[in-house]
Image: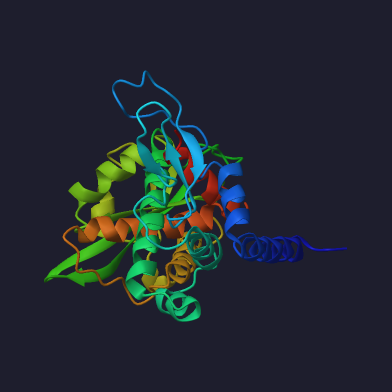
Amino acid sequence: MESRLQRIERESQEDDQSILLISRFHQTTLNWLYDNGLLHRNLTCPGQLCNQNQLSIIQDLHTADRQKFRCKICKTSKSLRWKSFFSDHKLTLMECIQIIFYHFIRNQSLKQVSNDMKISLTAVGRLYAEVRAIISQFIEDFKIGRQLGIESTDPLNHLPIVEIDETLMTHHNGGQMWVLRIFDRVTKELWCWALPDRRAETLIPIIVSNAGACCRIYTDGWESYSDLAEAGFDHRVVLHVDGFGSGQETTNGIESCWSELKRLTNHSKGIHVSNEDPLGILQQFVNVGCWRRNFKDQDLCSNLREIISLYYSS
């Protein structure tokens, strides 16, 4: 009998192959984009005198996509990519689909994609950056109103349990950038926050907002966590000089998650950024890693299609 792991691998391979087949021809690519809500079939004319007239899709062999939107009343024309995820990208739609739903899903590096597809690093990088940004936005919206550690697993104390830790991720312009991680032992969800420091006044408000009020929290011995008891949590300390603990008294879960997250982000030695918003960029990278980990039991290709169509629906 086929194991769960074998089934997931087979379905992933089949999905990979289907994306490559779909994106071999322009028309099949268009049909797939329309069917999955990634290109619009119906848009209204932006002209003030057109009274919300529906734009028509007509052929135009002089455009890269061979089709465009046109208003029958005012003759206004719009790109087929208007109001879509692809509106600011110059690559063919076939190339965009392969990069996003084949190479990005498989977590391939920019250099590898650029070499394989013979496309400039800049073009691939822009597409990757936009995909990271929209996934990160989805994760941030997903976290709103959601708390970790609200389901009980302890039959004696009836307390849900979370593990918390912080890590120095990288240095930037003489400063430090840290990542706070919260892991829920029941749901196995992991959420991360990019922060400029690990002081109590920085960490505690995030923990209070995102961990269930009655949960038990396991941390290491970092002094900033000493205020958790005053915040109403059942706080337990696992001293790492003695290892990561055992049984219930452990932070093995968060350590294991962090190893996996670093592998998924492909930045196990730190993320080096030179952007005007270094914390924001770091947050995007760890959010994508959280997305890959937290939704790994789902079809990431389908999930990403839904995310893009969610934010670019007409």
Quadrant containing the C terminus in the rendered view? top left
Task: Judge left or right: residue 272 versus residue 130.
Answer: left
* 260 to 290, vertically: above or below: below
The color scheme shown is rainbow
Looking at the image, which residue is at 39% across and 39% down? Answer: 141
Q: Most extreme residue toward the bottom, as rendered?
A: 115
Looking at the image, which residue is at 49% across and 72% down? Answer: 108
Nearer to us in this view, 189 or 134: 134
Nearer to us in this view, 151 or 102: 102
**Residue 26, percent from left and from top:** 57, 58
* 183 to 175, vertically: above or below: above
**Residue 132, percent from left and from top:** 39, 57
Q: Most extreme residue toward the left, as rendered?
A: 174
**Residue 183, percent from left and from top:** 46, 52
Nearer to us in this view, 265 or 75: 75
Q: Most extreme residue toward the right, as rendered?
A: 1
Nearer to us in this view, 295 or 195: 295
Task: Judge left or right: residue 143 versus residue 41.
Answer: left
Residue 233 visible somewhere in the drawing: no
- Residue 238 falls in image quadrant: bottom left
How many numbered discs sit on the rendered protein?
A: 0
Looking at the image, which residue is at 19% across and 55% down? Answer: 199
* 128 to 35, vertically: above or below: below
Quadrant containing the N terminus in the rendered view? bottom right
